[in-house]
Image (spheres, coloured by chain):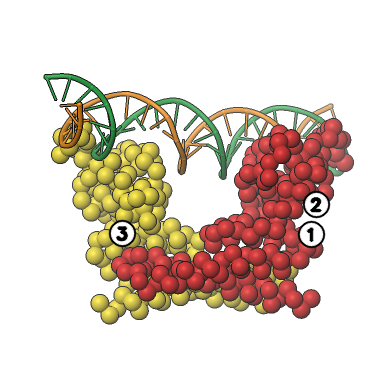
Chain colours: A yellow, B red, C orange, D green
Amino acid sequence: MAAEGEPSLSLAEWLVLCLICEQPTHGFALAVLLSAEGEMGRVWRIPKPVVYRALQRLEHLGLVQATEHQPSSQGPVRSLVDATPAGRRAAAGWLTRPACHNRDVRSELLVKLALLARQGGDPRRLVKAQREQLVPVARALHDRLDAATGFDKTLVLWRCETMAATLRFLDALALQAVPE
Amino acid sequence: MAAEGEPSLSLAEWLVLCLICEQPTHGFALAVLLSAEGEMGRVWRIPKPVVYRALQRLEHLGLVQATEHQPSSQGPVRSLVDATPAGRRAAAGWLTRPACHNRDVRSELLVKLALLARQGGDPRRLVKAQREQLVPVARALHDRLDAATGFDKTLVLWRCETMAATLRFLDALALQAVPE
DNA sequence: CCTCAGTAGTCTCAATGTGACTAGCTGAGT
DNA sequence: ACTCAGCTAGTCACATTGAGACTACTGAGG
């Protein structure tokens, strides 16, 4: 209801919202998908209770809407959930936004890439945006490398190497995505 | 009391234990050291309540021992805490053990390196052990890279790059530690 | 004398995660 | 026909973690 620019959701909530945007579904299916055995669970796992709590919060925020209880093909009744227009807008925005910090790449960016892959979307825009987000940070880090002394040097070195790994990863993705 | 081979402690508990092994101290000093402004906080932060809970658990396990309340130089009384022989043994063992998984290097290994740096210890043994721990994993990952398809390829690529970053970091440390 | 800044430690609350639990439905065996 | 194992669907209670406020004691300065 509130006209917030971007709702502040946890990663689990964003992920659940994006999956619902793919097609109307229900809690249990999401929980299976996000479990260790599920397809999404290979990238990022979300425990069952967290999935259901996310559903509650998303519904409370008006980003998804539960329809009446539907009889299942086999098993007890279940309540189908669909995304609202506001939910779709928020999800689309989130999916294109790169992670702010290198440390969030494993969680945020990889989840977004996995979602795009599921939907047959083009990852190149996101990869490019992520690169542009990180390159200045990488440069600044590299400049600090010479000045740093003692254990600070070790820390900056670590950050430099992991940052460089992320950039190489992004470059590889950009190359591998083009030829198709 | 129980003659366990290695107690199972959280990172916060290990860290607190190792700091106490450096010299007898008290909760507040540890909390400051491990806060955002503290020296250790630059590497790994531990919120104040967690520090005190760690102290309780360590004492319960017989790894540290609180002396009677000591009057502070300025401020209210405080209770000094010292490590027991069992605590020292456990801490020494933990400090030499490399992290099992690449994902734990940022937390576990860097903390251990920081502790060694504070104590003027030699990081080379640990760095070497960590390398030996990860190299076979890195090789196995690299082998999976060609076979992987679809989003699995992206995931394996990510793991390969971050693993390579860790190995480069370890190599840089090994080189930089020798000349002194 | 009072208050303020620093020291020392505790408490409560929200979020997250784990594992067990309820409960409906269906098909395989008896 | 009966029941019971196993799948589907969702909930509950509990432990752990972390953030932030709160208590309380002390010495210094106005």
Q: Marks 3 and 1, how far apart in space?
A: 46 Å
Q: Amino acid at mark 1?
A: Gln
For residue B127, which quarter of the picture? bottom right
Q: x and y percent of residue B62 in the render? A: 74, 37
Q: Amino acid at mark 2?
A: Glu
Proximity of marks 2 and 1: CB atoms separated by less than 8 Å: yes
Secondary element at image label 1 = helix
Residue position marked by numbered label 1 in the rendering: B119
Q: Are marks 3 and 1 on the same chain?
A: no
Q: Chain of mark 3?
A: A
Q: Is residue A133 above or below residue B40?
A: below
Secondary element at image label 2 = helix
What residue lies at 41% left-to-right and 58% top-to-bottom? A108
Secondary element at image label 3 = helix
Residue position marked by numbered label 2 in the rendering: B22
Between A91 and B90, the residue placed more toward the observer is: B90
